[in-house]
Image (cartoon, helix red, strand yellow):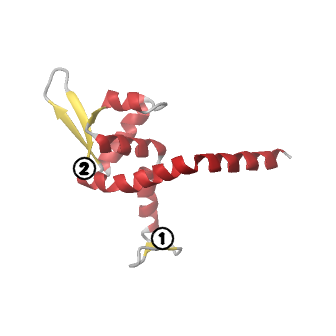
Amino acid sequence: MKLLGNGKLTAGFDADCPATREILNRVGDKWSVLVVVLLGEQATRFNQLKRSIEGISQRMLTATLRGLERDGLVKRTVYPTNPPQVDYDLTPLGRTLLEPVKVLAVWAQGHRAQVQRARDAFDRRGKS
């Protein structure tokens, strides 16, 4: 997949395709999207994130934050308190992801009913 100068993607695959897919897998998974949106509001502690994201396990949140940190999207700050306080925040690079993620979230919310109707119709056809 290649981005042309006009901002459109080509259908051709080249050496960049695996790297693009890897990055999209990271930023496009459901947990990463939720973490990015929450951190876009303010720096947040781990337990506060966990309470805010229904259904995420401690292990999955840890893995998601580490992956986002590894990719340069999230910054982890440890404060020398007893016990240590750890905050997570978006990096400047992570902030550039906020707008596309928000647009996708708004699209998902706006089209949720249509998608559900399509799923229901598909499932009914499959049972016939």
Say whether residue 25 is left or right of residue 76.
right
Q: What residue did someone put label 1 on?
A: 1
Picture quadrant of residue 87: top left
The furthest residue to the right: 128
Q: Position of residue 19 (x, y in %)?
A: 41, 62
Q: Quick one: 12 or 39, which is closer to the camera?
A: 39
Say whether residue 101 is left or right of residue 121.
left
Task: Report the amino acid beneath label 1.
Answer: Met
Which residue shows up at 35% across the image and 40% down it?
38
Q: What residue did someone put label 2 on?
A: 91
Picture quadrant of residue 82: top left
23 in relation to 116, above or below? below
Picture quadrant of residue 120: top right
Task: Report the amino acid beneath label 2.
Answer: Thr
Q: Quick one: 2 or 99, which is closer to the camera?
A: 99
Which residue shows up at 30% across the image and 52% down it?
94
In terms of secondary structure, where does tag 1 sit?
A: loop
